[in-house]
Amino acid sequence: MAKSLFQVKFLESIVAVAREIREAIFSTVPRDTEITKVDFEGPKVAIYTRRPQVFLENDGELVKKIAKTIKKRVIIRGDPEKRKSEKETEEVIEKLIPEEAGLKNIYFNDITGEVEIEVLFPEKVTQDALNAIFFETLWTPRVLRRPPVHSRTVKEIRDLYRASKQERIDFLKKLGYKVYRKPIFPTQMVRIVSLGAAREVGRSAILVQTPEANILMDAGLKPTGNGDELPLFDLPEFDVDDLDAVVITHAHLDHIGALPVLFKHGYKGPVYMTEPTLHLAKLLLEDYVKVSEREGKDPLYSMRDVNSFILNTYTLTYGEVTDIAPEIRLTFYRAGHILGSAMIHLHIGDGLINIVYTGDVKYARTMLLDPAYNKFPRAEVLIIESTYGSKTDILPSEDDAKLELGKIVLETAQRNGIVLIPVLAVGRAQEVLLALLDLMKKQAIPQLPIFIEGMIDEVSAVHMTFPEYLSATIRGMIYNDENPFTSENIHVIRGEAREDVIEKKPAIILATSGMLTGGPVLDYLRMLADDENSSLVFVSYQVEGTLGRKILGGLRKITFSDPSGKAITKDLKMQVYRVEGFSGHSDRRQLEAFIRRMEPTPKTVILNHGETSKIDEFMRYLGSEWFKKKSGLSFEVRAPQNAESIRLV
């Protein structure tokens, strides 16, 4: 009975808010705007008009006025009855897009009235040119970057959206009505529930609950294979049918690996992430399915579930404020961890409380990325990763790490060996590639072949598709038609026998997975394990329980499966190194610096994503009188366990 009453009130609130928004718009605009329709497109209110220039003249003054009045994001669309034909519109586009932009393809979406314009250099297309296309044709232009090298991932996502345009617009309309409905209950209580990554590294998942909404931040897997891979989705607090939104910080499996599982079990709601994260997530999640099937394991989800998440994803840029539920607004901020990584800022209630969740964060500039952002409009609660929370977790600078890596490469080359570097395909692989190329350019190491395998080249292509998310140096190279991820030294392994690769000594091999939990790196390790002249170099964090962590702990007898499937045990005679300065995580000093420089200072700091010993040590330090005296800061510090809830208000 109570549920039926809630459903009635839910529908009533949807009708009421839609009516109020339309009335507010028509009472705000002049009569000559010729509005033909007002509708929802996700978190945006779409206004269809025969005269878009009236809305966009004077720097969009009328649009700003409407948005301020209805307190919603507004997009202007051309009336479909007045749009020019596709052929006429193509002629206008070809006339107005400058030749130096490199026009490649034009795609029309007759349902939304958008025209996608693929060019090599979007930054060379002016807003004046886009406005002229819109006013002349009434098609809304959307400029997309054509990757300078072919990217299967980029093509498949764009093709999927184009082939599913009706399904996509239906989803967006449904989402809009749900997001903008009036709250039924007063927002007086907020709590979080740790479903994963509390006092551990892996399976990140935090549930945010209000009387009105359930928001899941991240949905990761734990890469151990010990039966504890999934977040605690079986807790009584969690019900996939009651989930209003999923918000993803970045595309590493320990933060996205369980996302398709939600769709497999009936989730039909929105997923929010940045656009690079969407592309990288597709790539990693599909690879997980393929690797599982290849190894004879039952994957946790199917390719169909991956496609479902893609069609339900709504991408946002840094700093873009978006309603995701009644009384909850989301903003992404740069996290500095990997391409597209974001910190989540949730504004809940009418100023009731603001939460910042860092996900994985790097508070330092790297060759690839700018450092994490640290200034927020409001932030009473900070949930921060503590992977390197111990006082001994002081990482070398990236420059020092580069020199250390160069020394290892040089010594291994002099022994006529191979440098085998297990890498995460996303982030670490690109940082290490840039470092190696820079060392060769400066003649600090010889011009060695660099063999890459396991999605690294495809991930690098995605990086080149979204240079606006990269550091100024790399962004400038891409804008100037320079490809920083290709060189005559780099050789992509596609079908070549790995036995032939290891005969080309001296050489460098970058292969996935970065924690030795699977992937092509295990084949190379099996073949090179007893070669005393070769080196095994770890450049990323090794989660407790993984083979990489065990080797760093002293394991030297390793069991492999040979090509016939037979188990063989080998002594590891390679030189083993750990080069930590390439980590995408903040070390202890950077974590402390982020907290001390964060504006405003939070009232509560919650530690997660770290081993228990590191969490406890960091928590004691932040709560100590010494820290309070040194920093002048004082806040409550919490470190929940998995399955524990914390009431914030």
Image (cartoon, rainbow, N blue to C red):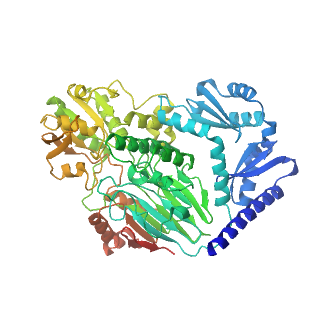
**Which residue is at the front of the view, 293 or 26?**
293
**Which residue is at the front of the view, 38 or 292?**
292
Quarter occupied by the N terminus: bottom right
Query: Would residue 494 appear left or right of 119 to someone viewing this image?
Result: left
In this rendering, does residue 599 appear at all? no
Q: Position of residue 367 (x, y in %)?
A: 38, 41
| Count of residue discs | 0
**Which residue is at the front of the view, 308 or 393?**
308
Q: Residue at 64% of width from left, 26% of height from top?
A: 98
Answer with the quarter of the image where residue 129 lies: top right
With respect to residue 566, does 489 lie above or below? above
Q: Position of residue 374 (x, y in %)?
A: 47, 57
With respect to residue 550, does 110 lie above or below? above
Q: Position of residue 487 (x, y in %)?
A: 36, 26
Query: Would residue 273 appear left or right of 396 to someone viewing this image?
Result: right
Q: Position of residue 574 (x, y in %)?
A: 15, 39
In this rendering, does residue 37 appear at all? yes
With respect to residue 526, does 27 lie above or below? below
